[in-house]
């Protein structure tokens, strides 16, 4: 997967995770809040991987 795809997928997971957390808080559902937090962290990790790939590619192009 390319750096842009990783960043886009990561942003999607991050947003979905935040939405799950909000829904969990609204319904007092601890499971949903935990799932949302996990998905948000997964998204942040995916974005970081995409950014790292981009930096490596730019460094290799020099």
Image: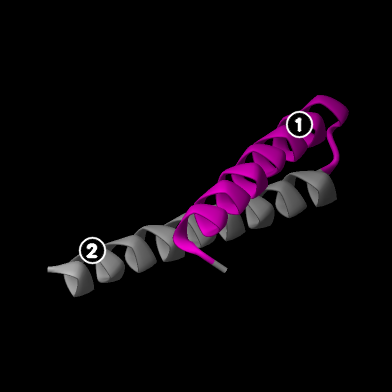
Query: 60 or 41: which is nearer to us?
Result: 60
23 lies left or right of 21: right
Q: Position of residue 15 (x, y in %)?
A: 64, 37
Camera-side mark, 2 or 1: 2
Identify the residue position indicated by label 2 in the image.
58
Pointer 1 local density, CA inside 10 Å: few below 14, some 14–19, many at least 20:
few
Residue pushed farthest bottom? Answer: 60
In the rendered image of this protein, does residue 1 appear above or below residue 11? below
Judged from the image, the secondary structure of the residue bearing numbered disc 2 is: helix
Q: Position of residue 37 (x, y in %)?
A: 64, 50
Q: Is residue 3 magenta?
A: yes
Q: Position of residue 42 (x, y in %)?
A: 60, 60
Query: 60 or 44: which is nearer to us?
Result: 60
Query: 9 or 43: which is nearer to us?
Result: 9
Q: Position of residue 59 (x, y in %)?
A: 18, 69
Identify the residue position indicated by label 1 in the image.
25
Q: Is residue 31 magenta?
A: no
15 lies left or right of 57: right
Judged from the image, the secondary structure of the residue bearing numbered disc 1 is: helix
Residue pushed farthest left? Answer: 62
- Residue depicted at 53% across the width and 61% down the height: 46
- Residue depicted at 46% across the width and 60% down the height: 3
Q: What residue range appears in magenta?
A: 2-29
- Residue depicted at 49% across the width and 53% down the height: 4
19 lies left or right of 14: right
Gap between marks 2 and 1 measured at Cα? 42 Å
Q: Main secondary structure of the magenta part?
A: helix
- Residue depicted at 21% across the width and 74% down the height: 60
In the rendered image of this protein, does residue 30 appear above or below residue 55? above
Quarter in which the C terminus is drawn: bottom left
Q: Earlier in the sequence, mark 2 or mark 1?
A: 1
Q: Which mark is residue 46?
A: none
């Amino acid at each position: 997967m390319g750096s842009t795809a990783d960043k886009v997928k990561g942003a999607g997971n991050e947003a979905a995770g935040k939405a799950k957390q909000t829904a969990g808080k609204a319904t007092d559902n601890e499971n949903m809040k935990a799932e949302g937090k996990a998905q948000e962290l997964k998204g942040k990790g995916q974005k970081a991987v995409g950014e790292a790939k981009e930096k490596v590619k730019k460094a290799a192009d020099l």
